[in-house]
Image (cartoon, rainbow, N blue to C red):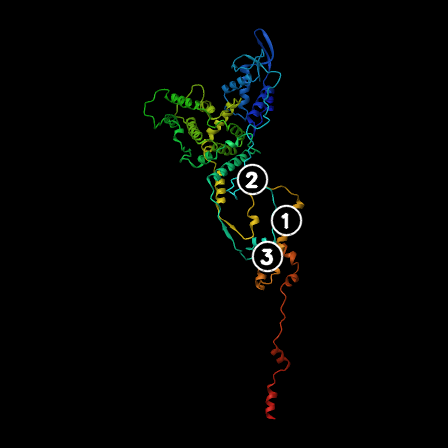
């Protein structure tokens, strides 16, 4: 019970994405191994040694630790554990009872080992191994310069009443004259910069890190590879190479199809024999083991290792791997797509005879191809375990990961369409059509916000209302119509200018109704027809 409680107390924490993840995992594993490995008294050659352990005991304990560690997973094998302990002995994490270390002669047996007095943790590099190239967005308003802005200052826009009148003319019933602005055609270089900047920005956002500088040398990212991997593909999503000489040899492709479609082998014309499938598998494994560089390339090792920190969040990990695989050279991506398809089909093919007598088919796939998929140019102590973890995840999600990221593709295409779209420009509105993109903002206080809200919005509106009210060339009917629309759109500004009905009525004074002069004369001297008749009688 006490052993179980101590095991739970030292349960490893998840090492998330970020720079130097392999180094952080190495140091964490060493600390857990030194703190948790049981030490006891052992007898060897009639001599007693205190606080030591047997090699097989170390393999048992460390294997259990790695299998229960969410950074590695349950697919870690005992052979991989022995390989890690060999590296521990080489790096003086452990030593034999006579103090010897430096060679990888550790075996799974009863030889005795102990910990040295100090803990040989690896320090983090003080400087990034890659150049700090900041990914910047081009200034698309001036494509001919083909330069980037080093700094984009924030400049507040002050709109006059005339400007506000032109921008809100539709609300008050008048549309000013305008003209169409046709954007210049984007060149191939412009499109490549868009794809590169937006891809790296999307990857950084998915990983949730502040910078990619410590994980990826962005200068080595080729935007041509990204575009080809997205668009130049067949119906199955496999990238089509322009240089056919870089494709897989026909005999290797035939062997892969044979095992992937077993027992239906379309390219197989010769009769098979007992153990034929094992020989075919060894042929494929031998070809991939002799490639000069892993399929994920040396330069992208750190970024793929960083993505492993997201495996607990499956959707984010899949999206991040989608983007990372788009960075690969097309020949590497094609080989990876065909290999992962074969591995996944072989692992799930119940009709295929066992390819090994000692391990399962899935474990054999991981062991045989992990190193040709991911490894470091410099010897990294945990690269075998990290590669196995990544390959296992790729096998389970290869179909989705090795397709182009739909979110990234849609985002880039919409951005390109926006840049090429015809724009409408109003006279006098130049101040708000040349704003740089992207823009930046900074936090302000509540009082400053209220001040800007009043001065930047209320004053232009008040000026616009005053212009309508004092316009002598506007007819009475038209002025009432516009004031009514303004009151409906901006009731607060309207009420401040016309607080009472009397103030509003002062704009429209009533005309004096003077009666015609003839009518006034008639009222003063009424018509008397009888008097005129009486005068004729006299």
The furthest residue to the front: 145
- Residue at (66%, 45%) from the top-left corner? 446
Horizontal and vertical percent for residue 79?
49, 19
Q: Which of marks 1 and 2 is in front?
A: 2
Is 412 located above or below residue 378 in the figure? below
Q: Judge the density around disc 1: few (<14), some (14-19), many (≥20) Cα neighbours within 10 Å.
A: few
Q: What element carries label 3?
A: helix
Q: Earlier in the sequence, mark 1 or mark 2?
A: 2
- Return the mark for residue 514: none
- Return the mark for residue 486: 3
Q: Which of marks 3 and 2 is nearer the N terminus?
A: 2
Residue 100: image quadrant is top right
Horizontal and vertical percent for residue 451?
66, 48
Please report contact status of discs 1 and 2: CB closer than 8 Å, yes or no: no
Is 150 located above or below residue 175 in the figure? above
In whole angstroms, how far apart are the C-alphas of marks 3 and 1?
Answer: 19 Å
Going by the image, does 332 lie left or right of 26? left
- Return the mark for residue 453: 1
In which quadrant will I find the C terminus?
bottom right
In whole angstroms, how far apart are the C-alphas of marks 3 and 2?
Answer: 41 Å
Residue 523: image quadrant is bottom right
- Return the mark for residue 149: 2
In whole angstroms, how far apart are the C-alphas of marks 1 and 2?
Answer: 30 Å
Q: Is mark 1 on a helix, strand or loop?
A: helix
Q: Which of marks 3 and 2 is in front?
A: 2
Q: Judge the density around disc 2: few (<14), some (14-19), many (≥20) Cα neighbours within 10 Å.
A: few
Q: Earlier in the sequence, mark 3 or mark 1?
A: 1
In which quadrant will I find the N terminus?
top right
Q: Is mark 2 on a helix, strand or loop?
A: loop
């Amino acid at each position: 019970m006490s052993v179980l409680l101590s095991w739970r107390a030292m349960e490893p924490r998840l090492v998330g994405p970020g720079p130097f993840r392999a180094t952080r995992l190495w140091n964490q594993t060493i600390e857990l191994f030194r703190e948790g490995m049981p030490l006891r008294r052992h007898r060897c050659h009639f001599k007693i040694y205190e606080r030591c352990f047997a090699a097989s005991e170390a393999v048992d304990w460390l294997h259990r630790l790695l299998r229960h560690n969410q950074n590695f997973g349950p697919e870690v094998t005992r052979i991989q554990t022995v390989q890690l302990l060999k590296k521990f002995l080489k790096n003086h994490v452990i030593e034999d009872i006579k103090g010897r270390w430096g060679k990888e002669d550790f075996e799974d047996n009863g030889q005795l080992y102990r910990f040295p007095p100090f803990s040989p943790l690896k320090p983090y590099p003080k400087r990034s191994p890659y150049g700090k190239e900041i990914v910047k967005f081009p200034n698309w308003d001036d494509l001919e310069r083909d330069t980037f802005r080093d700094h984009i200052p924030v400049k507040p826009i002050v709109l006059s009443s005339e400007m506000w009148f032109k921008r809100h003319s539709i609300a008050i019933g008048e549309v000013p004259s305008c003209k169409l602005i046709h954007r210049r055609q984007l060149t191939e270089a412009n499109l490549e910069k868009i794809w590169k900047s937006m891809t790296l920005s999307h990857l950084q956002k998915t990983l949730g890190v502040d910078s990619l500088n410590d994980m990826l040398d962005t200068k080595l990212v080729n935007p041509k590879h990204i575009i080809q991997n997205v668009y130049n593909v067949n119906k199955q999503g496999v990238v089509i190479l322009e240089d056919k000489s870089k494709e897989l040899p026909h005999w290797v492709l035939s062997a892969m199809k044979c095992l992937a479609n077993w027992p239906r082998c379309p390219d197989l014309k010769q009769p098979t024999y007992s153990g034929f499938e094992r020989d075919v598998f060894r042929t494929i494994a031998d070809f991939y083991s002799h490639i000069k560089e892993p399929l994920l390339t040396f330069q992208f090792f750190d970024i793929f290792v960083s993505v492993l920190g997201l495996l607990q969040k499956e959707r984010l990990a899949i999206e991040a791997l989608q983007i990372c695989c788009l960075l690969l050279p097309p020949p590497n991506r094609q080989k990876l797509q065909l290999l992962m398809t074969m591995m996944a089909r072989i692992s799930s093919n119940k009709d295929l005879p066992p390819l090994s007598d000692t391990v399962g088919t899935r474990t054999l796939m991981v062991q045989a191809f992990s190193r040709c998929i991911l490894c470091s140019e410099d010897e990294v102590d945990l690269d075998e375990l990290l590669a196995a973890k990544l390959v296992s995840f790729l096998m389970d999600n290869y179909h989705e990961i090795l397709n182009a990221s739909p979110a990234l593709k849609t985002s880039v295409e919409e951005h390109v369409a926006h840049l090429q779209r015809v724009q409408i420009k109003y006279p006098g509105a130049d101040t708000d059509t040349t704003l740089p993109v992207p823009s930046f903002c900074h936090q302000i206080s509540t009082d400053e916000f209220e001040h800007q809200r009043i001065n930047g919005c209320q004053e232009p509106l008040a000026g616009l209302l005053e212009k309508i009210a004092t316009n002598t060339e506007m007819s009475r009917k038209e002025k009432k119509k516009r004031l009514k629309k303004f009151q409906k759109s901006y009731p607060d500004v309207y009420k401040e200018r016309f607080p009472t009905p009397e103030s509003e009525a002062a704009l429209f004074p009533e005309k004096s109704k003077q009666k015609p002069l003839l009518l006034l004369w008639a009222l003063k001297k009424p018509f008397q027809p009888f008097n005129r008749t009486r005068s004729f009688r006299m």
